[in-house]
Image (tube, rainbow, N blue to C red):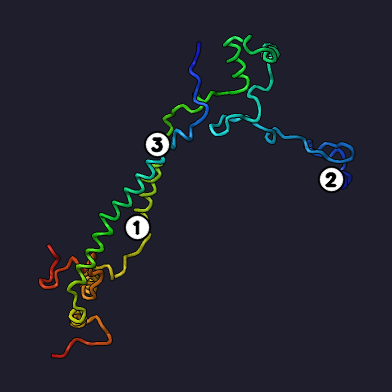
């Protein structure tokens, strides 16, 4: 009976041949996905919000709602 | 030195069997568990000792034959020599077992039991929650958050329609 000689060496190289490129691909694609799906939309949302933002109007709205202690709602 | 002093105090007959006298000093008897042991382990492929320690006469003669040219050994003899040195082969050692199902089942059983205990605790040990959890109170909290424009860009205030006083569609 003659069994085939088992693999004696080169296990790490064999593993790395697949997993090293795979590691790069997975890392880059998750970074890309995060950028496209989360980072860019967030930057756009902030840009949109502040494009026509009137802070005084916002402040007065908050003042009317009565949340401040330093300024009361405007007396009519 | 200290041991011999202690021995002279205690007296020879009161000695325990694990202390032997040798040249006036005490020498501890070698316990079996302190000696190198045989383990089948994937990450330690060459154990410290042979599996079979007490060879039968056939095994002893086989070991003698091993001293000569190995081409003279038959396949059965080679396997017998292997089994003297090792208990399980790598294939036997690494074989699949369905033990994980038992482990997972027991884990889930204990998680479920813990859940039951937690439910009982919530019902019979804890008192009532504070009044701040009443729906009217929570509604007032939410209104205050919207008034303060909490997270107006992407969060909660961005979902509220301030003109029509309702959630955005």
Residue B166 coordinates in the image, percent (x, y): 13, 68
Identify the disc placed on residue B3.
2
Q: Which of B62/A13 is in front?
A: A13
Residue at label 1? Answer: B122
- Confirm whether circles 3 and 1 share one chain: no
* Badge 2: chain ID: B
Please identify, in this view, whether the residue under mark 1 or under mark 2 is nearer the observer. Answer: 2
The residue furthest left is B164
* Image point (78%, 38%), residue name: B28
* Badge 3: chain ID: A
* Badge 1: chain ID: B
Residue B102 coordinates in the image, percent (x, y): 41, 34
* Distance in Å between CA atoms under marks 3 and 1: 51 Å
Q: Determine whether the residue tagged by mark 1 lies in a helix, strand or loop.
A: helix
Q: Which of B161/A27 is in front?
A: A27
Give above or below for B9 relative to A3. Answer: below
Give above or below for A58 relative to A11. Answer: below
* Quadrant the C terminus of chain B occupies: bottom left
Please identify, in this view, whether the residue under mark 2 or under mark 3 is nearer the observer. Answer: 3
Residue A37 coordinates in the image, percent (x, y): 25, 54
Give above or below for B79 relative to A49. Answer: above
Residue B135 visible in the picture: no
Q: Which of A74/B19 is in front?
A: A74
């Amino acid at each position: 009976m003659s069994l085939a000689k088992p693999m004696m060496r080169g296990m790490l190289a064999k593993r790395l041949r697949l997993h090293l490129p795979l590691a790069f691909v997975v890392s880059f694609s998750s970074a890309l996905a995060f950028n496209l799906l989360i980072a860019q939309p967030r930057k756009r949302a902030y840009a949109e919000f502040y494009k026509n933002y009137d802070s005084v109007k916002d402040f007065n709205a908050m003042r009317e709602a009565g949340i401040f202690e330093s300024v009361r709602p405007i007396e009519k | 030195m200290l041991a011999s002093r202690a021995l002279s105090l205690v007296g020879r007959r009161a000695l325990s069997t694990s202390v032997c006298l040798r040249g006036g000093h005490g020498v501890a008897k070698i316990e079996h568990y302190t000696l190198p042991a045989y383990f089948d382990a994937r990450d330690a492929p060459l154990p410290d000792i042979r599996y079979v320690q007490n060879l039968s006469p056939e095994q002893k003669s086989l070991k003698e034959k091993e001293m000569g040219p190995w081409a003279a050994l038959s396949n059965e003899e080679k396997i017998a020599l292997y089994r003297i040195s090792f208990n399980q082969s790598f294939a036997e050692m690494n074989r699949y077992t369905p033990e994980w199902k038992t482990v997972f089942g027991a884990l889930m059983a204990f998680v479920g039991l813990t859940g039951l205990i937690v439910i009982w605790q919530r019902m019979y040990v804890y008192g009532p929650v504070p009044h701040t959890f009443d729906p009217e109170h929570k509604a007032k909290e939410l209104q205050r958050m919207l008034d303060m424009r909490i997270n107006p860009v992407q969060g909660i205030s961005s979902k509220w329609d301030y003109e029509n006083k309702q959630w955005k569609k």
